[in-house]
Amino acid sequence: MPTLLVKAKPNARLSSLTRQDDGTWLAQLKSAPVDGKANAELIGLVARHFGCAKSSVSIRTGAGSKLKRVEIPD
């Protein structure tokens, strides 16, 4: 399973997922980082972007930090 390095920016005006020049991803999330809401939004955003089910996307490391490793299906 491929792993993405994602930098999360909560409390953004719009939700978006963009690839950066260095190969990492920038996720701008509307949700606040409270009670896992931003992580849930991130999983939904990644699943929608890559066309896979939310249940197949998981945050491997960094659930409590801005820099996260997110695993997606092949």
Image (cartoon, rainbow, N blue to C red):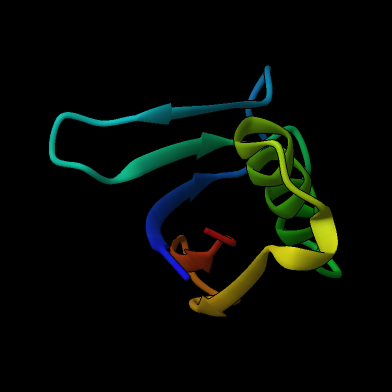
Query: Is 13 drawn above or below residue 49 in the view shown?
Result: above
Give the residue furthest to the bottom: 61
Residue 64: image x %, image y %?
58, 76
Between residue 74 and residue 25, name the one nearer to us. Answer: 74
Question: In this orientation, which residue lies closer to the viewer: 14 or 73?
Answer: 73
From the viewer's side, name the closer residue of 3 and 45.
Answer: 3
Q: Residue at x 86, y 69 (%)?
A: 35
- Could you tell me which residue is drawn at 62 percent across and 43 percent down? 10
Q: Residue at x 50, y 49 (%)?
A: 8
In the picture, measured across the screen, residue 57 lies left or right of residue 3, that is right
Q: Residue at x 51, y 65 (%)?
A: 70
Picture coordinates of residue 42, whole percent (x, y): 68, 49
Q: Position of residue 44 (x, y in %)?
A: 78, 45
Q: Dividing the picture into quarters, in which one does residue 40 lie?
A: bottom right
Q: Nearer the viewer, residue 54 or 5?
A: 54
Q: Is residue 60 above or below residue 37?
A: below
Horizontal relation, residue 68 to residue 43: left or right:
left
